[in-house]
Amino acid sequence: MDIAVDKVSEFILRARALDVKEGLSDPDSGSNPIDDGARDVLVDGTDDATEEELREMIAGLNDDERADLVALLFVGRGDMEPEEFPDAVRLAREREAAGTRTADYLLGIPNVGDLLDEGMAAMGLSSTV
């Protein structure tokens, strides 16, 4: 793989943080973190940079790293087997060449962090998260 395990692990950690976010359920609560058990940290607000950070992280990857990340997703989701990883990388490159933005694709998949973690495990690698 051309992408470092640490980069994938960081992506998994941030993706999981994004997955637990929920919509604004009480916009006029007026409560404070102590009174509400700090539940507001799980609310997806306009000042939350988690998705933007993930998009920037993906944008900072080179072509090979982006292809590896998507290929890991394919393996983790069960679309391809670990021994088909080179084919998964080729498919990921073709997807991007056809105009699919990697950030939009990955962030549109529920539980993408868990799927990447499963892909890493299938490849015999362990994430650091």
Image: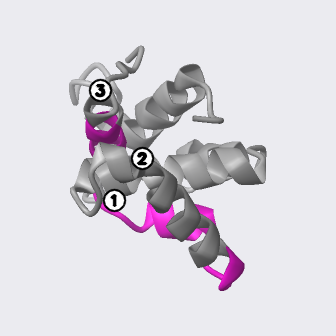
The amino acid at mark 1 is Leu
Residue occupied by mark 2: 72
Q: Is residue 40 above or below residue 43?
A: above
Across and down, in percent, residue 77 comes to: 25, 55
* Secondary structure type for disc 3: loop
Q: Amino acid at mark 2?
A: Leu
Residue 38 circle label: 3
Mark nearest the camera among 2 and 3 is 2
Point out the tag, 2 or 1, that comes first from the N-terminus.
1
State the extent of the magenta-drawn residues as a range: 97-119
Q: Is residue 124 above or below residue 83?
A: above
Q: Nearest the camera: 128 or 72?
A: 72
Residue at 68%, 42% (x, y): give it: 57
Residue 114 shows in the view: yes
Q: Nearer the viewer, mark 2 or mark 1?
A: 2
Left or right of 4, for residue 74: left
**2 or 3: tag closer to the N-terminus:** 3
Residue 98, x across and y down, in percent: 65, 85
Dominant secondary structure, magenta? helix
